[in-house]
Amino acid sequence: MIHNYILLSLSLILLGFIFKAVCDTLKFHFSTSIFNRQKLQYWWGTSSWTNCYKDHDYKKGEKFFGSSTVFIMFMDAWHCFDFLRSIAFISAFTVYAFDYSFWLFLLLTIVIFMGGSMIFEFLYSDIFKKDFWKK
């Protein structure tokens, strides 16, 4: 049984790195990638991150509640694959709880993801900005 969990963990880690490759390709090599097609620009394009804002304008605020935070993974390909990468890596470590209960596995995965997301948001929105340190 433990061999199945090890195999599943390794598969999830591999999947996480595949998702990471998609993210980095979109961010750093979009123009030469297989994702660079006119029909795919809205979801895959370099400015697709603006999908979460009204009229694609950061200054106008969120398109809807949570579109730039809690629901960001549904707004563009980069955020979707970043979310999937996170879930794959977290699941690789929490899959062992599946032996006890699917619900425990799911709860642990969600708690770890939400905790990490809150830390990210705090650092990204506040701590890493120059204005925060000028106070």
Image: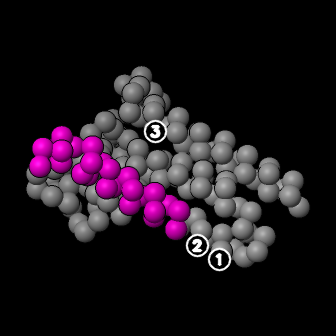
Q: Which residue is mark 3?
A: 23
Magenta span of residues? 111-135
Give the alpha-carbon distance from disc 3 to disc 2, as whole Å.
26 Å
Q: Residue at x 21, y 61 (%)?
A: 63
The residue carrying mark 2 is 107
Position of 13 relative to 108 (above/below): above
Q: CA distance from mark 3 to mark 1?
A: 29 Å
Task: Residue 67 in the image: state x and y as whole percent.
Answer: 29, 61
Amino acid at circle 2: Leu
Closer to the N terminus: mark 3 or mark 1?
Answer: 3
Q: Residues within 10 Å of mark 1 (few under 14, many from 20)?
A: few
Residue 66 percent coordinates (x, y): 29, 65
* Helix, strand or loop under label 1: helix
- The kind of residue on which mark 1 rests is Trp
Q: Residue visible at 38% across and 60% down?
A: 118
Is residue 37 located in the magenta-colored stretch of the structure? no
